[in-house]
Amino acid sequence: MKSKISLCSSRGGRTTGRGARANGFTLMELLIVMAIIAILMLIAIPTVGSLKKKANDLSAIQSIHTIINSENMYESTYPTNGFACSLTALGGDPKSGPPSATSAQLIQPDLASGLKSGYIFSVTNCSKINAGGTDRITGFTVTAIPQTVGSTGDRAFCSDQSGIIKFDPAGGTNCTQTLGQ
């Protein structure tokens, strides 16, 4: 007599076999989990982008404060020159020697380069008077413009020797709205 081979075996009183479920997740369960993760990512990614822009904005505002303070220190240190008309004059490497009118070492190198946290900084519109054959800078404008409007920042910021920071909501240099401090 021939014996039949059973596809089912008995373990602990339970029958397992072809119809039994294997350990692990089904393809449908994995797809559902992946869909949930994708939805969460779609919600989180724009939030992360807006937080980055907000951080860049705050950094730009703080950098303008730093430049204004450095300009005031520069003017008191080099009164015959007045204010500095460039970021490189406010910057400088301490290893290159003592501070001078062309390298005052008042701001960090990243800010002196004009590029920091997604913004482009510059000192422009320098007004000067000629006193005794020497030009003395009596006024300036500091601008911070996003490298890519909408990506690295939405607003541009401007200030002058008065220290009042204004902004342009379009990201240009037409700073007309006063920043609420």
Image: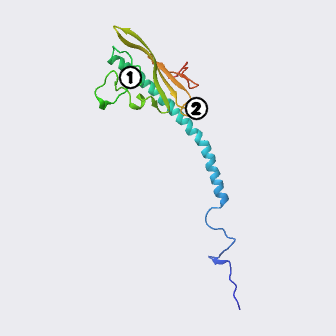
Closer-to-camera residue (123/57): 123
> Label 2 crowding class (10 Å Cα cut-off): few <14, some 14-19, many 20+?
some
| 125 or 10: nearer the viewer | 125
- Establish if 29 lies above or below 45: below
Q: Residues within 10 Å of mark 1 (few under 14, many from 20)?
A: many
Q: Position of residue 19 (x, y in %)?
A: 69, 71
Tell me if residue 121 comes above or below residue 140 in the rendering: below
**Residue at the extreme bottom:** 1
Please tell me which residue is depicted at 38% across the width and 9% down the height of the picture.
Answer: 130
Residue ID for mark 2: 150
Rendered location of residue 37, percent (x, y): 61, 50
Q: Amino acid at mark 2?
A: Gly
Q: CA distance from mark 1 to mark 2?
A: 29 Å
Q: Which residue is denoted by mark 1 in the rendering?
A: 70
Instruction: Determine the residue located farthest toward the front in the rendered image.
Output: 133
- Residue contact at pointers 1 and 2, CB within 8 angstroms: no
